[in-house]
């Protein structure tokens, strides 16, 4: 019997990308339920689809995502399995964090969970870089960390996409633009919680004039860190930690420029470790697609694990 899949918020950027990725899966052992467009915001109609489906993707603003879960829980439904691509449940201890490459335990939980929250785009890069360092005790949770990232404008949502693609757009959109200047960004709690940090990192995100692709970087200065850390040590750690899956250590030798859009339309992530010959200044970078491993690709990856169950 085919599993029933419902994408709540299918008309948005993430929802459309999830649908496209589902259409490309080889194993057609599921069917996609579609709500009439004019009823997509009707709570009663949505409740029918949410409670009919075996798997639900939530591609919604946070509050509406929470409402969707309440429509399932309120019906006493314990069988529908939810994959939430919003920020609403990423730090909720009752939900499984949808990043299988972080550890064998993360993957196992995803396979068995009924409630999975997939990572945010910038957070995916930060966590991929920092989680192994904290887990291995190479970095202490009390370290004060910072990161900066640049992303294509598709990560800003439909309204911003329309603004960037307008013929009469502002000339400011021709350049990179910093935001979250007050150091309040929705990904910071996720970065802190998942990595087990004592403090949220300083975070400087930048949106730029291209559609998709992202690079996030974390600078480290070993002389102010509590533990000794080197470029080679980090490379060895990443290589052993990320043996399987879509996250891999990339060769940083000879690289002068690191373009942010190279992995656009891919579901992979590349990790880079740069530094001077004495490891006095180290730069960790993660390159991936904000719509791929940073959003829709990660959600479909979790779905694939959940429907196949424990291996």
Image (cartoon, grey):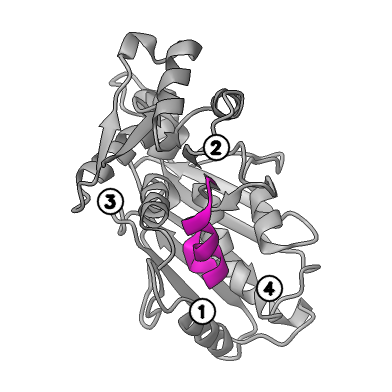
Picture quarter with the C terminus: bottom left
| Nearer mark to the viewer, of 2 and 4 | 2
User: Percent position (x, y) of residue 296?
Assistant: 38, 45
**Residue 127: percent from left, percent from top:** 58, 61
**Residue at the image position 34 percent from the left and 25 percent from the top:** 11
| Residue for badge 2 | 78
Which quadrant of the figure has residue 137? bottom right
Q: Residue at x 33, y 40 (%)?
A: 18
Labels 1 and 2: the sequence-earlier one: 2
Tell me which label, 3 or 1, sits earlier in the chain.
1
As helix, strand or loop, the secondary structure at mark 1 comes to helix
Q: Which numbered marker is on residue 241?
A: 1
Q: Which residue is mark 4?
A: 134
The Cα–Cα distance between marks 2 and 3, rounded to whole angstroms, is: 34 Å
- Percent of width and height locating residue 224: 77, 77
Q: Earlier in the sequence, mark 3 or mark 4?
A: 4
Q: Nearer the viewer, residue 156 or 164?
A: 156
Which residue, as the protein is rendered here, is positioned at the far front? 1
Left of 144 or right of it: where is 72?
left
Q: Tag on residue 304? A: none
Q: CA distance from mark 3 to mark 4?
A: 30 Å
């Amino acid at each position: 019997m085919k599993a029933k899949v419902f994408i709540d918020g299918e008309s948005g950027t993430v929802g459309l990308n999830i649908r496209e990725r589902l259409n490309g899966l080889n194993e057609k052992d599921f069917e996609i339920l579609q709500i009439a467009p004019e009823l997509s915001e009707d709570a009663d109609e949505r409740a029918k689809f949410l409670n009919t489906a075996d798997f639900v993707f939530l591609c919604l603003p946070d509050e509406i995502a929470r409402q969707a879960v309440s429509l399932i829980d309120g019906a006493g439904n314990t069988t529908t399995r939810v994959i939430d691509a919003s920020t609403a449940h990423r730090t909720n201890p009752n939900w499984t964090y949808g990043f299988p490459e972080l550890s064998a335990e993360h993957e196992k939980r995803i396979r068995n969970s009924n409630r999975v929250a997939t990572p945010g785009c910038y957070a995916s890069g930060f966590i991929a870089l920092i989680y192994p360092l904290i887990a291995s005790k190479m970095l202490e949770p009390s370290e004060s960390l910072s990161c900066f990232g640049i992303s294509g404008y598709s990560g800003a949502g439909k309204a911003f996409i329309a603004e960037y693609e307008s013929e009469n757009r502002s000339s400011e959109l021709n350049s990179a633009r910093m935001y979250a200047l007050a150091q309040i960004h929705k990904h910071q709690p996720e970065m802190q919680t998942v990595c087990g940090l004592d403090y949220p990192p300083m975070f400087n995100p930048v949106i730029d004039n291209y559609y998709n692709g992202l690079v996030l970087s974390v600078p480290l200065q070993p002389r102010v860190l509590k533990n000794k850390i080197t470029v080679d040590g980090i490379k060895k750690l990443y290589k052993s930690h990320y043996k399987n899956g879509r996250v891999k250590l990339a060769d940083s030798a000879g690289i002068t420029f690191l373009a942010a859009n190279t992995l656009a339309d891919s579901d992979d992530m590349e990790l880079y470790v740069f530094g001077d010959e004495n490891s006095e200044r180290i730069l960790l970078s993660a390159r991936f697609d904000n719509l791929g491993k940073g959003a829709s690709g990660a959600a479909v990856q979790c779905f694939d694990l959940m429907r196949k169950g424990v291996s």
